């Protein structure tokens, strides 16, 4: 079926330009063009769109307001924004409602690739099974305010690690947890870190940001009693997967951005387990028991009970929160990377391998039958020869961390 893409820009010439440069896609995409946010919302009320690509600066309803509205009314539509360099104040207002920002002018090839990838992801999040699961979710944790504040500061353009550290430092409970963590064996620093500002400088802003998100989600689970999840083990597993994924991306000589996205994806890859456990503590412990007893993959047992897996649930939540497409993709497909529409190395590759290696390292979280690498995918991604080196490196680098 053709993907439905909605382009919004107040300038008819820009829309014509888009129509021309995207013409090659007309067999795969149904493209609709709107000259205002109001017009876009009207079009959306008549039918589902897979992706919306909006200009930021528009008279009347601007791109930030439009995408906020779309997020509330049509949460499964993937939201992309095109913004110029002087749009930072507006960008700040769309924090959380936008999946990806593209900077103007955007090359047609880059725009095409981004939309393709985003729409494939939207497809997996739109699945009927997820709709059924989400309809049952009474309590989705909200995006932590602290995370929003840090993201806003970053998008204002002049935030340094120091500024970010100062924002986080205002939250005493979060600071205490962060400091405990950065002084643990996972970050194996030579000297003790005594302030959040220092931690932000040492670890980098993206890492601090994702740690804030993850600590917040994990703290939510205190509310449940018998979820069938050994929390400490899952937390340790998430940190280990993150650091393995970051190492793997570094070994591939990826850009710093991709290294950071791999780390963040690793940290958050199993948050769906939290979402399911928080919402359905009894059913989730039954799923875990059934997977162990019947020697099933955890995902298969989850699918039997909920119609969707923890990977689906986690990706859905983080997609709603507007995490970048490569991160949501990595989380959605970490157990089934072959379903990905592109085969080049990405945070998904790093997290898929990191997760299996982390399970090899510590089997206490292994439920049912052990996880295996998807060799077919790894061959297509052209990294099957690297696994030995990756395994050795992560072991050397992280041995002893717990
Ligand atoms: Fe998983
Ligand atoms: Fe995992």
Image (cartoon, grey):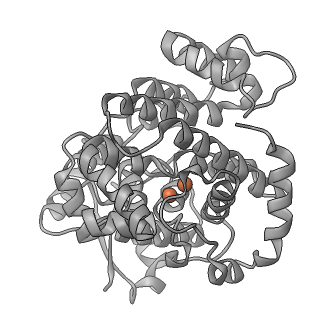
Q: Please tell me which residue lies in front, 249 or 17.
A: 249
Residue 257 visible to the viewer:
yes
Along the line of sight, the residue nearer the viewer: 96 or 397: 397
How many numbered marks appear? Answer: 0
Q: Position of residue 389 (x, y in %)?
A: 86, 65
Residue situated in front as seen by the camera: 355 or 166 = 355
Which residue lies at the image location 62% right of the left edge and 54% below the top edge? 363
Residue 49, visible in the rendered structure? no
* Residue furthest bottom as drawn: 27
Left or right, 159 with respect to 101, comes to: right
Image point 79% across, 69% down: which residue? 387
Q: Which residue is drawn at 63% across and 24% down?
A: 159
User: Which image quadrant is residue 233 in?
Assistant: top right
Q: Give the camera-side residue of 336 and 300.
A: 300
Q: Where is residue 114 in the image (x, y as percent from the top left)?
A: 52, 66
Horizontal side, residue 54 vs residue 74: left or right: right
Q: In the image, what residue occupies the spot 62% across and 76% down? A: 374
Residue 325, above or below 278:
below
């Amino acid at each position: 079926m053709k993907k439905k893409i909605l382009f919004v820009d107040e300038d008819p010439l820009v829309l014509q330009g888009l129509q021309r440069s995207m013409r090659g896609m007309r067999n795969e995409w149904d493209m609709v063009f709107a000259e205002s946010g109001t017009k876009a919302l009207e079009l959306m009320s008549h039918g589902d769109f897979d992706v919306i690509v909006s200009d930021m600066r528009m008279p009347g309803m601007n791109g930030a307001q439009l995408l906020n509205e779309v997020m509330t009314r049509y949460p499964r539509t993937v939201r992309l924004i095109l913004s110029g360099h002087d749009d930072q104040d507006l960008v700040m207002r769309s924090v959380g409602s936008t999946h990806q920002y593209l900077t103007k002018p955007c090359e047609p090839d880059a725009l095409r690739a981004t939309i393709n990838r985003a729409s494939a992801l939207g497809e997996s999040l739109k699945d009927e099974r997820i709709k059924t699961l989400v309809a049952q979710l009474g309590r989705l944790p909200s995006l932590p305010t602290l995370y929003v504040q840090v993201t806003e500061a970053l998008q204002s353009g002049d935030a340094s690690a120091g500024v970010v550290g100062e924002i986080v430092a205002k939250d005493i409970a979060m600071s205490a947890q962060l400091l405990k963590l950065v002084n643990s064996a996972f970050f194996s620093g030579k000297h003790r870190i005594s302030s959040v500002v220092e931690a932000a400088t040492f670890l980098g802003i993206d890492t601090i940001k994702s740690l804030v998100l993850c600590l917040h989600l994990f703290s939510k689970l205190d509310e449940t009693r018998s979820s069938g999840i050994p929390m400490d083990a899952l937390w340790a597993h998430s940190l280990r997967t993150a650091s393995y994924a970051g190492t793997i991306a570094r070994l591939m000589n990826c850009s710093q951005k991709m290294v950071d996205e791999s780390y963040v994806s690793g940290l958050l890859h199993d948050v769906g387990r939290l979402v399911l456990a928080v919402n359905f503590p009894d059913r989730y412990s039954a799923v875990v028991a059934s997977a162990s007893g019947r020697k099933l993959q955890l995902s298969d047992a989850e699918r039997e009970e909920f119609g969707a897996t923890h990977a689906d649930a986690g990706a859905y939540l983080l997609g709603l929160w507007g995490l970048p497409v490569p991160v949501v993709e990595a989380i959605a497909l970490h157990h089934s990377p072959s379903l990905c529409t592109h085969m080049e190395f990405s945070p998904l590759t790093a997290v898929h391998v990191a997760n299996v290696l982390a399970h090899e390292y510590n089997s206490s979280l292994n439920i049912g039958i052990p996880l295996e690498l998807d060799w077919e995918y790894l061959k297509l991604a052209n990294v099957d020869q690297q696994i030995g080196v990756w395994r050795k490196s992560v072991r050397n680098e992280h041995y002893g961390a717990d």
